[in-house]
Image (spheres, rainbow, N blue to C red):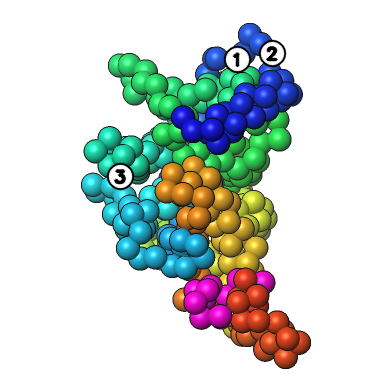
């Protein structure tokens, strides 16, 4: 160990001793308790709610469409070992698949867990990335190191995953510094209400417990007339479904039960779908809801979707990947998202170009402008 590493280790030990205590001592070294089940969120939300599925699917596809590029000393390096890892991270999954799974796990469960696979023959550097089911992984807090290790429960045994071998991204739960919170958790009652409304409507339409109504004749019917009227109703009911029925005069139809429209089924679902979309930061037109849509506000919705939803999410993921993965390859290595081909952001790029032109006229260098506006050009172009 050289002198610089000794100094760094000494400073780390001193910092550990000065850190505030985040839990009682009896909780240190024990797996974190979880109050949310990702698998249940998938089965009772993602797989049964059209709006949850649509929102999460749209996010997954948008995020995975953005290429990840490795920069070394500020310049894109397509031959860098980390770039090669991102291009081929798993025996069966592409990086696009992994990014989709990360998004699904985060938005449905609040946490994403990826195991780093290393080879000693490669100097212990990462060679593969394996996404794990967050339900089967639990962080084990430690007062000195924050997280000592992770427990991976695969049913017949519990494996220990070292903290340095785990990429753990989470959506912040203000009450828990070790485990994240899903947006779906906040919307659970709304989603349950919507799912139950759909089930109720399905059962009602298939097998209504109360008759739709009765035909009341204003005069007495003979046995033959009653039989003829009953047969007439049966024929029209089975043949024309919801179409109008013709029985003759002096008869009144009296409805006996409420229809789905009278129960305001459609309007109630509109309310819940708006809430679900807002929880996931997905404008309604992005999931095929065009009630109030025009060409102009659809384009605006697409831009809002990217600027207010996807871009902040990508920054979150990139911060985690850079901290837990890129640092393995050096302090001068960074992973960036290439959003240059996202059509919804092209207008934003045009605005940046205009700003860049003005900055250039003010005397700023191209390199300074590139860094300030995050235009994504290599430093050598400055």
In the rendered structure, are the residues bearing label 2 and label 1 in contact, judged by CB atoms less than 8 Å apart? yes
Is residue 173 shown left or right of residue 36?
Answer: right
Does 380 lie within the magenta span? Answer: yes
Q: Nearer the viewer, residue 308 or 44?
A: 308
Specify the label residue 127 is tagged with: 3
The answer to whether any part of residue 98 appears in the image is yes
- Front position in the image: 284 or 261: 284
Give coordinates of residue 79: x percent, y percent.
Answer: 32, 63
Q: Is residue 298 magenta?
A: no
From this viewpoint, is residue 269 visible? no
Task: Report whether 32 appears left or right of 233.
Answer: right
Distance in Å between CA atoms under marks 2 and 1: 7 Å
Residue displayed at 42% across by 48% down: 329
Q: Residues within 10 Å of mark 1 (few under 14, many from 20)?
A: some
Q: Which residue range is magenta in the image?
A: 372-382
Q: Earlier in the sequence, mark 3 or mark 1?
A: 1
Residue drawn where x is 63% and y is 67% of the image: 307
Give the residue number, with chain letter if any, for mark 1. 28
* Residue 213 pos. (x, y %): 57, 51
**Residue of label 2:** 24
Around disc 2, counting alpha carbons within 10 Å, would you say few (fewer than 14), some (14 to 19), or many (20 or more)?
few
Q: Residues within 10 Å of mark 3 (few under 14, many from 20)?
A: some
Quarter residue 196 falls in: top right
Q: Nearer the viewer, residue 8 or 88?
A: 8
Residue 4 found in image quarter: top right
| Picture residue at 66% right of the left edge, 56% below the top | 278
Q: Residue furthest right?
A: 362
């Amino acid at each position: 160990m050289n002198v610089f590493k000794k100094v760094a280790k000494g400073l780390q030990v001193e910092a550990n001793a000065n850190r505030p205590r985040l839990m009682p001592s009896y909780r240190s070294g024990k797996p974190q308790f979880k109050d949310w089940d990702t698998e249940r969120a998938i089965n009772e939300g993602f797989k049964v709610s059209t709006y949850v599925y649509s929102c999460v699917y749209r996010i997954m596809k948008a995020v995975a469409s953005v290429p990840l590029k490795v920069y070394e000393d500020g310049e894109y390096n397509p031959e860098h070992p980390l770039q090669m890892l991102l291009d081929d991270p798993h025996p069966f999954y592409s990086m696009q698949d992994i990014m989709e799974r990360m998004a699904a796990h985060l938005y449905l469960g609040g946490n994403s867990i990826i195991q780093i696979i290393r080879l000693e023959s490669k100097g212990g550097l990462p060679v593969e990335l394996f996404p794990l089911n967050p339900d089967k992984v639990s962080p084990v807090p430690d007062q000195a190191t924050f997280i000592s290790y992770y427990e991976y429960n695969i049913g017949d045994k519990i494996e220990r995953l070292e903290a340095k071998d785990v990429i753990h991204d989470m959506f912040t739960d203000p009450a828990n510094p070790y485990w994240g919170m899903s947006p779906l958790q906040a919307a659970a009652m709304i989603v349950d209400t919507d799912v139950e409304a759909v089930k109720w409507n399905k059962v009602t339409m298939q097998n209504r417990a109360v008759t739709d109504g009765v035909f009341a004749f204003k005069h007495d019917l003979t046995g033959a007339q009653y039989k003829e009227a009953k047969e007439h109703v049966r024929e029209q009911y089975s043949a024309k479904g919801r179409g109008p029925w013709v029985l003759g005069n002096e008869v009144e139809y009296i409805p006996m039960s409420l229809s789905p429209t009278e129960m305001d089924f459609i309007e109630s679902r509109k309310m819940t779908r708006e809430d679900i979309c807002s929880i996931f930061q997905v404008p309604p037109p992005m999931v095929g809801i065009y009630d109030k849509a025009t060409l102009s506000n659809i384009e605006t919705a697409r831009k809002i979707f990217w600027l207010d939803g996807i871009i902040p999410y990508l920054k979150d993921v990139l911060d985690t990947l850079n901290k837990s993965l890129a640092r393995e390859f050096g302090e001068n290595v960074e992973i960036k998202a290439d959003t240059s081909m996202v059509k919804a952001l092209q207008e934003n790029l045009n605005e940046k170009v205009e700003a860049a032109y003005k900055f250039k006229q003010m005397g700023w260098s191209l390199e300074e402008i590139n860094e300030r506006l995050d235009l994504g050009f290599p430093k050598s172009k400055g």
